[in-house]
Structure formats: C-alpha cells, structure tokens
Image (cartoon, rainbow, N blue to C red):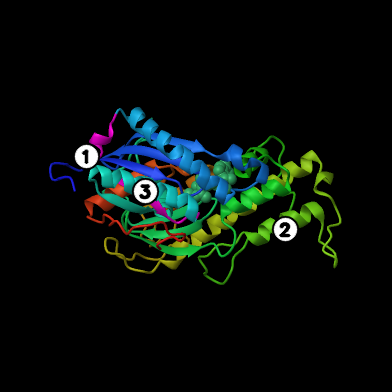
Amino acid sequence: MRDLSHVTGSDALILGIETSCDETGAAVVQGGVDVRSNVIASQHTLHQEYRGVVPEIASRAHAERILPVIDQALRDAGASLGDITAVAVGNRPGLIGSLLVGVAAAKALAWSLGLPIIGVDHVHAHLYAGLMRTGAHPAPALDALYPALGLVVSGGHTAMYHCDSPTRVHRLGATIDDALGEAYDKVAAILDLEYPGGPALDRLASSPGASDDAYVLPISRLGRGSLDFSFSGLKTAVLYAVRGVPGRDGAYPHESDSLKDDQRRDLAASFQRAAVEAVLLKLRRALESVQDEPSEDKPPKRRGKHGDGRPGSSHPYRTLLVGGGVSSNSRLRAALTEFARTSGMALHLPPLPLCVDNAAMIAGLGFHLLIEGRVSDWRMTAQPTTSA
Ligand code: KG4
Ligand code: ZN
C-alpha cells in the first residue's frame, strides 16, 4: 500500500463512488469539505416507463456508466488518479446488484493504485451532505455542530438519528413501511403525475390556488412516544380519496382519470401538508424524548415551559442535520427552517444537488472514516441493509 504519511487532512483527495440505486455518481472531495467535482448520471429516463427503479436495468446502466463518470469527476476536479489519497464507496444499503458495480469499480481502482478503500454507509452519508463547501454553499466548523439531531428523508429511507460526529450516529427511529420519498412517488402515480413523482408533486402542491386543507388525511403517530414513521396509511388515504373505497370484490368505484385538475392540485397540497406534519411531529417527539437526559457538554436545564424543545428547554442538540432526496422539498425545507429556529438549533440542509444521491457525500464521510483509521479491508462488500 502507498505511503500516505505525508498527507495532511486538508490535502487528502478522496474519490467517492455511488451506485446504490439509480444514480451513477463519482466525486472528488478535498479535506472532507471542498467538493472539487460531483458527477451524477441519472437513470430516470430508463425507469420512467415502469414508474419505479427496475433493479436489473439499474445495475446494467451502472456497469456501462461507472468508468466514464469516474473519468469525468477526475477531469472536473483537475486531478488524475495519481493525485487520489483514498477511494470511498457507498457499499450499503441499496440494491445489491447496483451496489456491487460501485464496490467492484472502487476495489479495482484502489487495489491497482495501492490506495486505501473505505466502505461508506449511504444513509449516514446523507447526514453529512449539508456540511461540505460547494459553489456558494459554505461549510460550517464541525466542532460546533454536535450533538446533532439527524433526519434522512429519501426514496428508500426515512429515519432520525442522534449524531455525536459525522461517523458516530445512532438511529432513533425509522419508517416501518414506506419511505417518505416512496410515498411521494406512489401518490404522484395515483395522481397521474410525471416520473419521478416527488418533484412533480411538490410543484403541483405549491401551484397557485392549491388548498392544503381541502382533504383531511391521516398523520401517523404510531405508539405513544414512538420515533418511528409510517406513510402507507397516508398513501392509501389518497388512493381512496381518488378512487373510492374498494368493494368486497376489490374493485374501486371510480377511475383515477375522473379527477378534475383542481381536485388533483388540492389532493397534492393536502398530502404534502400531512406528510410534512408527520415528519415534524416525530422531530418534536425526538426533542421531547431527550428533554431531561443529561449530555456530556450540556447539563440538563429547567424543562421548557412547553416541553417542546424551544430555547430554554433542555434538549442537547445544537444542530439539525437533514439529507436525502425529499430534503429538496419546498414545504419541508420551510417547515424545518421554522422548527429549527423555534427549537434553538442551527439547521444544515444540503444545497439541491447534494440532497439527492451523490458521490460527494460518500467521499466527504469517507474522509472522516479515513482519518479515524476506519479503512476497510478487501473483504468489504455490498450489503443491502444500513449499518445502524
Ligand atoms: O436520496 P434519493 O436521491 O434516493 C434515495 O436514497 O432513495 O431520493 C430520491 C427520492 C425520490 O423518492 C424523489 O421523488 C424524492 O426523493 N424527491 C422529492 C423531491 N425531490 C426528490 N420528494 C418530494 N419533493 C421533492 N422536491
Ligand atoms: Zn439516498
């Protein structure tokens, strides 16, 4: 293995590789902070006609694109393979055939160049995506951020985390059925919107005249104090609002094309309101659940008047870290901004290109694993599930 003793933290150039689902990504990140390049080859057009990701098509497309995407990321960064310090790859969670393409490419490159290889948990990397410098987006000082409350809202995952550092994260709760992005995509399909559904639904819900209280839709709470999420009931409520409740024969009373444009728009807005409120409800609970717990650097104070995490209450979190495709949603971003403000936390949302799947976040988190000595060995492989 190459001697890396001369490399200082701020010099380290990490090549990140991301192929967990339907985006083929490669990026070069310097010192864990500066995004020197971030290339994403989207497969949306390949999966459009199926209204969802077809795993076999996804892995074939990754195999065709991965080398040109890596070449492009190096060119954009003005770097060559000889400049790279280590290779980081998203090796979990995701579609196994897709992950294997990235892992094989990363291992081959690292092996042939004598570089360390670092397997990175894709969901944890989403929590890091908002902490890098790219374009006009500044990077915060990491030592002022933790402990942080983390939220990942993507097409495959919806979970909350207690974060003590970029690499030390502990899951507080997760969805028990659909991920939030999955619910957006399915509801968009019910409303006959274009694929991918999340951004289309966001646009329709935000269009002039949309009424977000035209339909009363359920906001899942689960058990008392539960920090898990559930979105399948909300999705089914939209389906029934559109097509009626199915009869004993399973047939729906209405066709989905019987929907008028204003109904479609109001349903989109009502769904979006309920979905965002369901996320906020769990964030509030997460703060309530730690109100009386002491933390290392912040002893418990008097419980806030409302016990809801406002300044003066005793939750330990300095920051709210959010990532995943749905963190680009306009209503969610506005609601999170207000929630963080009233709860006394600094909010770190990624810029839009780093909300969705990307390799910069893999390289960024990979850097922290590298400086902690947590490099992988050659047995590292693709895993379908997250590590925590
Ligand atoms: O993080 P991501 O690229 O992939 C996964 O790790 O799953 O997230 C993709 C998801 C899709 O479900 C997509 O519809 C959703 O993010 N999404 C949105 C918006 N932009 C992307 N959902 C709601 N509003 C948006 N503006
Ligand atoms: Zn993702």
Residue 32, position in %: x, y? 29, 43
Which sits earlier in the primary sequence, circle 3 or circle 2? Answer: 3
- The image quadrant of residue 161 is bottom left
Decide if residue 345 is in sight here.
Answer: no
Tell me if residue 104 comes above or below residue 173 in the rendering: above
**For this rendering, which residue is in front, 108 or 288?**
108
Q: CA distance from mark 2 to mark 1?
A: 51 Å
- Looking at the image, residue 215 sits to the left or right of residue 274; the answer is right
- Residue 83 in magenta? yes
**For this rendering, which residue is in front, 296 or 311?**
296
Report the mark closest to the observer, 2 or 1.
1
* Residue stretch rendered in magenta on the structure: 79-95
Identified at 53% across, 54% down, the residue is 156
Identified at 26% across, 54% down, the residue is 375
- The image quadrant of residue 363 is top left
Residue 231, position in %: x, y? 62, 59
For the residue carrying disc 1, how many other residues have a C-alpha within 10 Å: few (<14), some (14-19), or many (20+)? few
Q: CA distance from mark 3 to mark 2?
A: 39 Å
Which amino acid type corresponds to the residue marked 2 in the rendered image? Ala
Which amino acid type corresponds to the residue marked 1 in the rendered image? Ser
State the mark number for residue 89.
3
Residue 371, position in %: x, y? 22, 50
State the mark number for residue 237.
2
Furthest toward the left, the residue is: 6
Q: Which residue is disc 1 drawn over?
A: 10
Identified at 82% across, 44% down, the residue is 257
Which sits earlier in the primary sequence, circle 1 or circle 3? Answer: 1
For the residue carrying disc 3, how many other residues have a C-alpha within 10 Å: few (<14), some (14-19), or many (20+)? many
Which amino acid type corresponds to the residue marked 3 in the rendered image? Val
